[in-house]
Image (cartoon, rainbow, N blue to C red):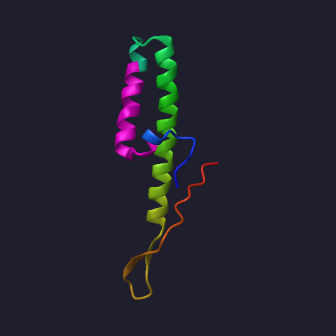
């Protein structure tokens, strides 16, 4: 389930795309060449990207946790509750 506090454009990103954007933000902030207002905006976006990545990882973990071994030895998948608990 999507976290409504995360901006819609970020919620649409894959884990990999969000992580890449977060890395770009870190590099730009570390360069010291970003103006203060831009740095604050970038930091805020980075925080949203981090939260989004956490949600994506939690969803993936829930899917993995639901892979089960049946009584006949066959591997199956049970539906997982995809609502992440981030608290």
Most extreme residue toward the front is 8
Image x and y of residue 37, in percent: 50, 14
Outermost residue toward the right?
87
Instruction: Let me know if residue 27 is in the magenta part.
Output: yes
Rendered residue at 37%/46% (across/down)? 14
Q: Residue at x 39, y 46 (%)?
A: 15
In this rendering, the answer to whether 13 lies above or below 43 is below
Magenta-highlighted stretch: main secondary structure? helix
Q: What range is drawn magenta here?
A: 10-28
At x 44% / y 40%, what residue is drawn? 10
* Residue 21 position (above or below residue 5): above
Residue 60 screen position, x and y as percent = 44, 57
Residue 43, image x, y percentages: 50, 25
Give the answer, above or below, for where 16 lies relative to 26: below
Pinpoint residue 74: horizontal percent, then vertical percent. Answer: 37, 82
How many labels were placed on the picture? 0
2 or 46: nearer the viewer: 2
Residue located 41% across and 26% down the image: 25
**Does the segment drawn in magenta span residue 13?**
yes
Q: Is 64 left, or right, of 84 in this rendering?
A: left
């Amino acid at each position: 389930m999507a976290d409504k506090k995360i901006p819609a454009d970020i919620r649409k990103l894959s884990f990999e795309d969000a992580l890449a954007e977060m890395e770009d933000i870190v590099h730009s902030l570390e360069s010291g060449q970003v103006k203060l207002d831009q740095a604050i905006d970038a930091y805020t976006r980075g925080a949203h990207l981090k939260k989004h990545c956490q949600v994506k990882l939690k969803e993936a973990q829930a899917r993995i946790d639901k892979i089960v071994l049946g009584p006949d030895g066959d591997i199956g998948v049970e539906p997982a509750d995809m609502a992440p608990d981030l608290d």
